Structure formats: C-alpha cells, structure tokens
Image (cartoon, coloured by chain):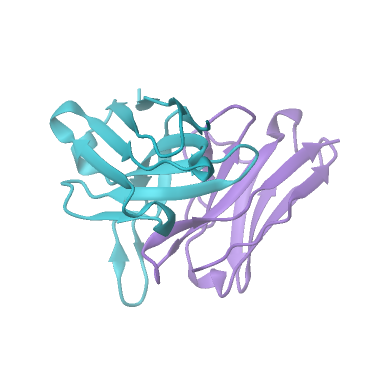
Amino acid sequence: ELQLVESGGGLVQPGGSLRLSCAASGFTFSTYWMSWVRQAPGKGLEWVANIKQDGSEIYYVDSVKGRFTISRDNAKNSLSLQMNSLRAEDTAVYYCARGSHPYCTSTSCYEFSAFDIWGQGTMVTVSS
Amino acid sequence: SYVLTQPPSVSVAPGKTARITCEGNNIGSKNVHWYQQKPGQAPVMVIYYDSDRPSGIPERFSGSNSGRTATLIISGVEAGDEADYYCQVWDSSGDHPVFGGGTKVTVI
C-alpha cells in the first residue's frame, strides 16, 4: 500500500524549532519529487517546499525561506522539514505529499505538477 | 504570482449536478488538478490533467478547462461528496504549485 506517515508535530513557542518527519512506504521513494504542504486552521492549502529525487534541487515558498529546511534520506525512505524561528502564522497541519504528473509549457518541462499521494498530516501549533 | 479564484461555497441537492469553478489568467493553457478534502482528512486527488480520473475515483467526477475557467463537475451528487474541493496548477513563472482558495460543497 502506498503510504506517507508524518510525525513530529506539537506545540512550540514563537522563535522555537521543530523537526517534522515523513516515512514513505509502498513505492520507490528515491524516484519521486517530494513536498510539504500546509493548511492553517480553517484555511486553504499552501505549498511550503519541494525537493528533487537526489536532493539537488530545493524550493521554498517565500514566507519560510531562511527558516525552514527540507531534506530527504533515500536510504531510509524519509523526508524531513526542519523548522526554525517559528512564528504564530506557521501554525498549521503539515502534509507530506508525493510529486506526480509531469508538465510541459512551450519553453520548459517540469518533472511534477501535482500531488498524488498525501500523508495524514501532523499539527504544528506556535503559541506562547 | 499566479492566482486561482474559487467560489467559497456551492450547494447542491442530492442527485443533481455540482459545478465548481476555478478562474485564472489563461488557465486553459495550463494543466489543472483537483483535490477533495473531507473534514479532518488529507486531500485526495480526484481529477488530474484537467479531466482525467485517478484509479478509484467514480465516473461521476469529471473536469473541463478552457479560457479563463476550469470546472470540476460532480454528477449525481451524493451525501458523501460533501467536502472542500481545491483546484491546483503549476505556476511556471515561479516554478511552484499554486492552489485555489477552496470551495465547500454542501449537499442540501
């Protein structure tokens, strides 16, 4: 069974740190882009970060650049998100998601454009 | 940054057809994906590449995309279709995915 299982969420004070993990199973983890997507309470989905299969390309949403670090360990089928200098606005459910569905424009091609497998999410609350 | 606009809510009677729109500049030139999210659950892909269905998704779910509007169509709506629905595209100018704000579908 294709599965992603997140862990590591919890309550943290503003300015604190937290490390999220995502364990993948049921597919060849090393052949997929992976992402983190978050959802603030009562709000919509927001992409946070992407990482290429070998970790050679990484992208972040502007609001977390310099504070969050995405990484992966293909030997352990594991994805991580190190979150530092946390703010109240980072409070959200964080989902691990598998990248899928290549997409080409007239000038560029991208190895993924959608998310076909999602974890159940882990809640991060930033509050004093 | 590319913006996708969805209506906040859509109400539909059981057995009828729900149409959820997703507007964006020249969205017809992009591939649109749709996700269903039930309360307390993770999103599930229901449509990819504008109109294709993943394995296990009922034929009642279909999609279209042209001009400024992509549409998710749910035919013969059932009570179990009550959920939030999100459209999503790849923003090639920013090299990242973009989600619409979501539409809550209520079966009345």
Q: Choose between B49 and A3: the one closer to the eye.
A: A3
Q: From this view, report whether residue B68 is shown above or below residue B32.
A: below
Q: From this view, report whether residue B50 is shown above or below residue A36.
A: below
Does residue B75 appear in this view?
no
Point out the image quarter for the N terminus of chain A.
top left
Residue at left offset 13%, top offset 30%: A75
Q: Position of residue B99 (x, y in %)?
A: 53, 54
Q: Position of residue A97 (x, y in %)?
A: 39, 39
Chain coloured cyan here:
A
Q: Choose between B66 and A91: the one closer to the eye.
A: A91
Q: From this view, report whether residue A25 is shown above or below residue B90.
A: above
Q: Position of residue B18 (x, y in %)?
A: 75, 47
Residue at left offset 35%, top offset 46%: A99
Residue at left offset 74%, top offset 42%: B105
How many numbered circles does the render carry? 0
The image quadrant of residue A112 is bottom left
Q: Position of residue A60 (x, y in %)?
A: 35, 54
Does residue A54 appear in this view?
yes
Chain coloured purple here:
B
Q: Is residue B1 left or right of residue B24?
A: left
Q: Choose between A15 and A6: the one closer to the eye.
A: A15
Residue at left offset 28%, top offset 43%: A70
Q: Choose between A19 and A52: the one closer to the eye.
A: A19
